[in-house]
Amino acid sequence: MAEVIGVRFKDIGKVYYFDPVGEQFEVGEQVIVETARGLECGFVATANREVEDSQIVKPLKKVIRRATHKDLLQLEKNQERQRYAMEQCQKKIEEHKLDMKLVDVEYTFDGAKILFYFTSEGRVDFRALVKDLAAMFRTRIELRQIGVRDEAKMMGGLGICGRVLCCKSFLGDFQPVSIKMAKEQGLSLNPSKISGTCGRLMCCLKYEQEAYEHLVATTPKVGHRVLTPDGPGQVVEVGLLKGMLKVRLDEEDASIGIYHKSALKSAPPPRTGREGRSAKVGPVVEP
């Protein structure tokens, strides 16, 4: 076991563990920590607690200090520099006629590196752009190509539900989403109805998938033979969420009955006579 605190570097981002070095921190405090990129300023997302060693990525970095007034001023200065860097980089992209869309710019806390995030449909030769930016800002330059889902998370916006995008409001990490989920949930496979603002399948398809998988596994499918309180029949329609099923009974009039799945049992296939009709099943008599 090890004592850690959880730190976020963005409002909605991944939580990283750091060694509090014996200090007590409250949620919301700003701290200066050592990262692979150097010193960074983040927010305490989880206060001091102990976690298993298996949950820690070693070596565990340490908290340097609580953010001071001087540190907060440095953050404000970095934000101003980021806006300027965004404008200048956009101009250089237009000058070089590069097929790329600049999404965001980020200064490291100590200003030792500037990160430019962009999207593009293909590979981009940005070596000349990096050279120009390095000469302009006199610091290390890094360009990172991101996907459309990451772009939506950075830019924000409203989903088709009318609410702020999940990835911008609370979703820390993206979960894999597949078209199979839409099929199992009985949704329209029209791309415009199951795609988010980013153009990819909506992340919310994942939220209820576990419940749907359980319902699919415990509910008879269309075409299955079942035994109802009114006799055997075949499932012709399934209401997955309510658990109500329409069953065509094996009676001569082939009437339709509606039953809850808890009232049904599996039934064997019907026995047929010489004329192909269902034969009546009577008691088995030993010879």
Image: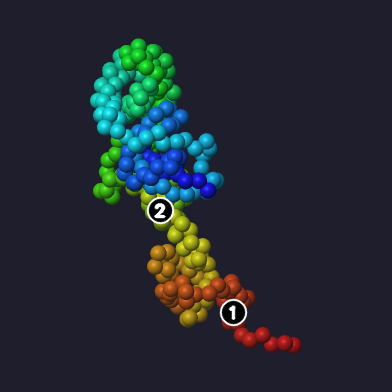
Is 140 placed left or right of 79 in the picture?
A: right
Q: Which of the labelled discs sits on residue 207, or is there none?
A: 2
Q: Which of the labelled discs sits on residue 194, or is there none?
A: none
Q: Distance between the residues labelled 1 and 2?
A: 47 Å
Q: Earlier in the sequence, mark 1 or mark 2?
A: 2
Classify mark 2: helix, strand or loop. Answer: loop
Q: Quadrant of residue 137?
A: top left
Q: Position of residue 40 (x, y in %)?
A: 38, 31
Classify mark 1: helix, strand or loop. Answer: loop
Q: Quadrant of residue 173?
A: top left
> Does 217 appear above or below 169?
below
Q: Is residue 72 visible?
A: no
Name the residue rendered at 36%, 44% in the picture.
Answer: 25
Q: Name the residue under label 1.
A: 279
Protein image colouring = rainbow
- Between 127 and 271, which is closer to the camera in this rendering? 127
Q: Can residue 283 be seen in this view?
A: yes
Asked if the residue under mark 2 is in contact with the one under mark 1, i.e. CB atoms within 8 Å, the reply is: no
